[in-house]
Image (cartoon, rainbow, N blue to C red):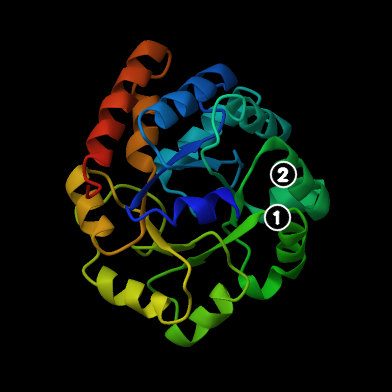
Amino acid sequence: MTRLEALFQQPRKQFIAYICALDPDYATSLEICKLLIESGVDVLELGVPFSDPLADGKTNQLAAERALANGATTDQVFELVADIRKFSEVPIVFYTYYNIVYNQGIDNYCQKAKQAGVDAMLVLDLPPEEAGEMVEACKRYDIDRIFLVTPRTLENRIPRITENASGFIYYVSFEGVTGERTQVAADLQERVNAIRKYTPLPVCCGFGISNADQVNQVAEIADGVIVGSSIVRLIAENEGDNPVILNAIKEKVSSLISGIPA
């Protein structure tokens, strides 16, 4: 049983936090990861810094820019995961882009990820129709495969998306890129129900969720809630002052998690 499978056997809803790995630098990023875990985050989603993060809004794009400007490399992201594994068994999901994987060799990348302690891969720009090699490599190294369903996904395509998925299905609750929104999508229940018709996998919702009320609304419908930009923004606003960054993130995450139903 994978870490994600074990986690979603629990009866409560799960809180997933996203940050860009190595933002703004290695040491600070490791401190942030430790703080998130200590604050009660159930799953850690690590963005792999990339120069052209097409699924990301401005907040997360700038996070990748900060990391890359400070010399971030893919191997350092693997090192970060290995360091996290020294103190935690929390599930870790890589949020990455196919160019990074392909450039290092699909099998090699997955092998390194597994050795470091990665549990699952979400490759943003790799559609399931073209993901055969990636799926096989992930299966070979017992890494869960996360695929996206969006508001524009036709229902007859959902079975194709879920066919080789494992861990959970990531539902993008708003069209467009990552970023904070003022309200939860009105059709969220309908869309999650449509996904559940075709898979027993948990459905986790992300994109646009930024406060405890929204967390609560989404958690009433989905199995997990994913929050990123509202956490990442605090790093940018307080860059250069680690104690302030950590305190701001601690307060924000505690507030967000309070929205998860008991």
Which residue matches tag 2?
114
In-front residue for pair 208/225: 225
What type is the residue that disc 1 sits on?
Asp
Label 2 sits on a secondary structure element that is: helix
In the picture, measured across the screen, residue 186 lies left or right of residue 197, that is left
Q: How many marks?
A: 2
What type is the residue that disc 2 sits on?
Lys
Which residue matches tag 1?
142
Q: Residues within 10 Å of mark 2 (few under 14, many from 20)?
A: some
In-front residue for pair 165/104: 165
Q: How crowded is mark 1: few (under 14 residues within 10 Å), some or many (20 or more)?
A: some
Residue 84 drawn at (x, y percent): 58, 28
User: In this orientation, does residue 116 appear?
Assistant: yes
For the point 42% across and 48% down, the residue is: 57
For the point 25% across and 47% down, the residue is: 260
The reply to whether the C-beta atoms of the residues labelled 1 and 2 are less than 8 Å apart is yes
Residue 74 drawn at (x, y percent): 70, 36
Label 1 sits on a secondary structure element that is: loop
Q: In which quarter of the image is residue 190?
A: bottom left
Residue 130 drawn at (x, y percent): 70, 71
For the point 22% across and 35% down, the residue is: 255
Estimate the spatial distance between the alpha carbons at disc 1 and disc 2, rounded to whole Å: 8 Å
Q: In terms of sequence position, does the residue under pointer 1 or pointer 2 come before the other?
A: 2
